Amino acid sequence: MPALETLSKMNSNPPQWFLNVAGKRVELKTEQLHNPNLFAIAVLDQANVISPIPKAKDWREIYLKPLMLSLQETEPLESLNPRNQIENLLYDYTVHRSRARTKEDILNKTAWTDEGFTYFRMEDFYAFAKRNNWEMDKIKTGNLIKQLKGIFVEEIRMDLKNQTPRVIKIKSMKEYKPELSNITYQESPF
């Protein structure tokens, strides 16, 4: 077995694992770290090192457990947290796009705001999120929205043009106007 040195974990979702193998840093997925066959393939791909393939039980007991005892964990950037990303997407969807004038405009794939609450169809928001490089599936996205304390209110049925689609109700997000600095610059005579 090549020398298995420092194991570190980035606590992102999904987590990223890094292991120094024979002096070379190898990035692993959880499945690759747990399965000796997948581990051997990853080490061969990234470090050009051929690793023997022990039995799964031996791999975990003899090699993986000692590495886990000295595991170095790191937190990812807060801006990369899926909750922060979904909040930003909700803000862009409900504040920075054209807004519905009436509740019936929800059927035109827009968000409608009334009396401190904003309403939209999940499928319309999800399509917007996908266009903005959101990678989570629709069910996980809905569950994540539902977990947003202070933002998510409920999912309701709303009467819209002889239809009763399900719509998401959230607290309205306020538009932030950036303040410009009052610094004046000397004009160049040229």
Image (tube, rainbow, N blue to C red):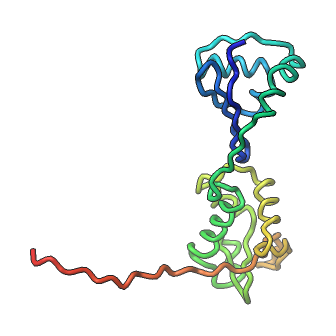
Q: Is residue 2 above or below residue 34?
A: above
Residue name at image x 73 percent, y 86 percent: 116
Residue drawn at the location 70% of the way across and 80% of the way down: 172
Q: Is 125 positioned to the left or the right of 176 in the image? A: right
- Where is residue 114? Give x, y as percent: 72, 86
Q: State which quadrant residue 131 falls in.
A: bottom right
Q: Position of residue 159 (x, y in %)?
A: 82, 79
- Seen as rendered, the residue at the extreme front is 70
Quarter of the view holding residue 29? top right
- Please give left or right for residue 172 compared with residue 150 in the image: left
Whole-percent x, y for residue 49 in the image: 62, 13
Residue drawn at x 66%, y 58% is 127
Towards the viewer: 78 or 65:
65
Q: How many marks?
A: 0
Above/below status of 41 relative to 96: above
Which residue is rendered at x = 78% and y = 12% of the image?
A: 53
Question: Residue 34's quadrant in the figure?
Answer: top right
Left/right placement of residue 95 relative to residue 171 reads: left
List the single residue furthest toward the left.
190
Q: Could you tell me which quadrant the C terminus lies in? A: bottom left
**Residue 84 or residue 21, whichever sits in front:** 21
Q: Give the position of the N terminus as an image quadrant.
A: top right
Task: State whether residue 34 is above or below residue 159.
Answer: above
Q: Is 110 on the left-hand or right-hand side of 183?
A: right
x then y, percent, for residue 185: 25, 80
Compared to residue 90, the image places residue 47 above or below, namely above
Give the farthest residue toward the bottom. 115
